[in-house]
Image (tube, grey):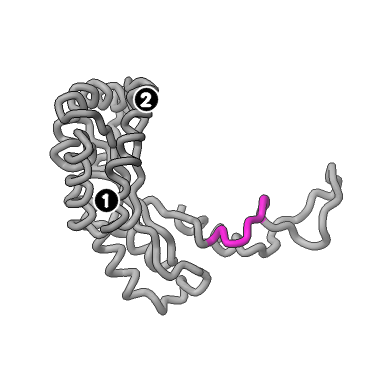
Amino acid sequence: GRRQAETFLELLGGKGFAQPNPRPMFPNPPGLLRLEPFSPGLRERIWWGSATNATAVWAARHGMNFVTLGGNDRVGRLIARFSEMWEQTRNDPARAGSPVETPHVALGRHLLVADSDAEAEALARPAYERWFASLAKLWYDHGAQPVTGMIIDSYDEARRLGQAVVGAPETVRAELAAQIDDMGFNYLLCQFAWGCLTHAQEMHSLELFTSEIMPALREL
């Protein structure tokens, strides 16, 4: 995985590497072919999903944006490790090809905003249970277990650990602000559609988030 990723990152700049088809459907440019579709600046927009200290260190060394998932304590340690290594590896040869000066450091969260805490909790519990059952089905069908740490099987545990952020606007706003303050991430990946939530419930949650929570988070 990571060795192939290093090759991929090197090729994002447009370097030719592939022999053209000797009988192409359309004319090829001369020489080796590059990755297509080619997008200038794509290297700066590549993210690395991390679940371990080793991958957090690797992402920092290679100058990549960083995203993780899980409970507050766990992801807090990963973000701290990534941030520490980002500074320590600024002159690492592996960083040479990266145009990223300040990385996006992202955290994924299940989010549900409703008109009251009670309504949000009543909607979120069955939705989370449905989401987890669907996600874990093939693991369980084949006698395996979901990835530990990143995927939390209990709604109550997801709430306790901070993976699921649920409530009225003021509740969600305060909880997210506390997580940002504690962990220092600068990018939030919000999952608004999950489990058995209806489209109307998802859209209402999104509308409350954009109107009553986002403006406050922008100032942090």
Foreground tag (1 vs 2):
1
Can residue 79 be seen at all in this image of the molecule? yes
Measure how far apart labels 1 and 2 are at the Cα level.
40 Å
Which residues fall within the magenta stretch? 35-43
Residue 56 is situated, as x and y percent measured from the top left of the image, at 33, 59
The image's mark for residue 138 is 2
The amino acid pointed to by label 1 is Ala
Question: Residue at (32%, 74%) from the top-left corner?
Answer: 87
Residue sitting nearer the eye, 183 or 47: 183
Residue sitting nearer the eye, 64 or 53: 64
Kind of element beneath mark 1: helix
The amino acid pointed to by label 2 is Leu
Magenta residue check for 120: no
On screen, residue 199 versus residue 8, left or right, reads left
Kind of element beneath mark 2: helix
On screen, residue 35 versus residue 218, left or right, reads right
Residue 190 is situated, as x and y percent measured from the top left of the image, at 34, 41
Residue sitting nearer the eye, 103 or 153: 103
Residue 57 is situated, as x and y percent measured from the top left of the image, at 33, 63
Q: Which residue is mark 1?
A: 216
The image's mark for residue 37 is none
- The quadrant of the rendering that contains the C terminus is bottom left
Q: Toward which corner of the image does residue 82 lie, by quadrant? A: bottom left
